[in-house]
C-alpha cells in the first residue's frame, strides 16, 4: 500500500470510529466545506435520476445537529465496514474509496434502520490533509 492509500485508509477508518463512538466532532473532521452527500431513495435506486439531496452542501452547525440527533435517538447495534478498492489520481490530489457497509441502528421504538450496501467516498487533497468532498448514499449491487 502506498502513502496515499494509507492516508485514505486512515480517513475511512476515522469515519468508522466516529460512527462507532458516535463522536460528531470526529465525524465532521473528515468533511470538506464543499461536501455534498446525495442519497438514493432506496438501496436499489442506481439511477441518479431518483436521488435526493437531504442535507444540502456541508454546513457544520446543521450537519452536527442532524448527526447528533441520530446519535441521541438511535442505538448502534453494529457497524461493519470493508474497504473494497482505493483509487488515487495520477496527480495524487484526488481519490475515492469503495466501501461495503452494514450499519444497523435501532430507535427507541425498536425500529431498525440498516444501512447495508456499497458506498463511494470521494476525497480531495487540501494541503497536507484529505477531505471528503462527496459520498454516495448506500446502494446494493
Image: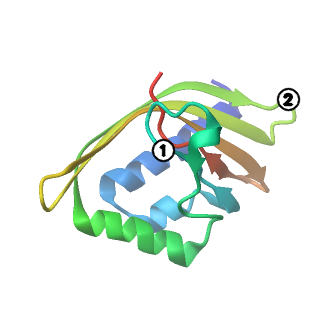
Neighbour tally class for label 2: few under 14, some 14-19, many 20 plus, Cα within 10 Å: few
Residue most toward the right?
Answer: 91
Disc 2 target residue: 90
- Foreground of the two, 10 or 61: 61
Question: Can residue 7 be seen in the rendering of this structure?
Answer: no
Of 124 and 75, the residue lying toward us: 75
The residue furthest bottom is 61
Q: Give the answer, above or below, for where 88 lies relative to 135.
A: above
Closer to the camera: disc 2 or disc 1? 1
The percent coordinates of residue 89 (x first, y second) are: 80, 32
Side of 102 where 82 appears, left or right: right
- Out of 63 and 94, give the one closest to the viewer: 63
The location of residue 136, given as percent across then percent down, is: 57, 42
Q: Is residue 90 above or below residue 20?
A: above
Of the numbered discs 2 and 1, the one sitting upstream in the chain is 1
Report which residue position mark 1 lands on. Answer: 41
Label 1: element kind: loop
Amino acid at each position: 500500500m502506498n502513502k496515499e492509500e494509507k492516508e485514505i485508509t486512515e480517513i475511512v477508518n476515522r469515519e468508522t470510529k466516529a460512527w462507532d463512538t458516535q463522536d460528531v466532532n470526529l465525524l465532521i473532521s473528515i468533511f470538506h466545506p464543499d461536501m455534498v452527500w446525495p442519497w438514493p431513495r432506496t438501496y436499489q435506486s442506481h439511477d441518479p435520476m431518483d436521488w435526493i439531496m437531504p442535507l444540502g452542501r456541508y454546513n457544520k452547525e446543521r450537519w452536527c445537529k442532524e448527526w447528533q440527533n441520530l446519535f441521541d435517538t438511535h442505538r448502534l447495534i453494529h457497524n461493519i465496514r470493508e474497504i473494497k478498492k482505493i483509487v488515487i489520481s495520477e496527480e495524487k490530489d484526488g481519490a475515492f474509496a469503495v466501501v461495503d457497509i452494514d450499519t444497523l441502528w435501532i430507535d427507541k421504538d425498536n425500529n431498525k434502520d440498516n444501512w447495508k450496501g456499497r458506498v463511494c467516498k470521494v476525497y480531495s487533497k487540501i494541503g497536507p490533509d484529505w477531505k471528503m468532498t462527496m459520498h454516495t448514499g448506500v446502494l446494493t449491487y
